[in-house]
Image: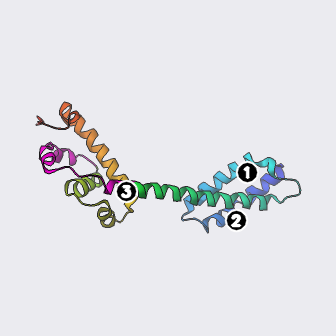
Amino acid sequence: MSSEAIHGLIDQRKQFLRFVENRVSSHAVAEDIIQAAYIRAMEKASTLHKDDSAVAWFYRILRNAVIDHYRHRAVEDRALEEWAKDLITETQPDSATQSIVCHCIENVLSTLKPAYNEVIREVDLAEGSIEAFAIKSGITPGNAAVRAHRARQALKKQLIKTCRTCAKHGCIDCTCP
């Protein structure tokens, strides 16, 4: 690719950005796509023939980049939805197991981020559904599932830190203060 063609592509950045912004959800996403397209153009510079228009060639790269963006997003959305379904169908512990749960959980919950505290209380302790929590919180079920997972990880980490040995063994016969 000639330096003339490169300068031409750089000079038309605003038009390219407008083209992408009209096809995606936000300016930030459009900027990311434009940057990735410029990198792709540099990698594929040898495919631009002298007879071809560099601008038309770059628009093809941009269209493909937008399509790739939506493909990746669709894959992520499907994965999060599947994960949410898996979490919904998980078996719940019986009442005997519930009664064994360490009493220090209440104290540890208050040390977590409010969003984590809320999801643990509503989904795990109150045995609510991920979907109900998602609706109440104004987020997708996939995002709710991710939040629940991260909250459980944070709770586990904090319990181990607080309770030490008893948390590693399931909080049975807890001796926490």
Q: Residue at x 43, y 55 (%)?
A: 80
The residue segment tinted magenta is: 83-112
- Nearer to us: label 2 or label 3: 3
- On the image, the x and y values in percent for residue 106 come to 16, 48
For mark 2, what is the residue?
Answer: 15
Label 1, residues with CA under 10 Å away: few <14, some 14-19, many ≥20: many
- Nearer to us: label 1 or label 3: 3
Left or right: where 125 falls relative to 65? left
Front residue of this view, candidates 126 and 4: 126
For mark 3, what is the residue?
Answer: 84
Left or right: where 106 falls relative to 67? left
Which SS class for mark 1? helix
Cα–Cα gap, marks 1 and 2: 16 Å
Front residue of this view, candidates 84 and 165: 84
For mark 1, what is the residue?
Answer: 41
- On the image, the x and y values in percent for residue 174 come to 12, 36
> Which amino acid, by three-letter code, is at mark 1?
Ala
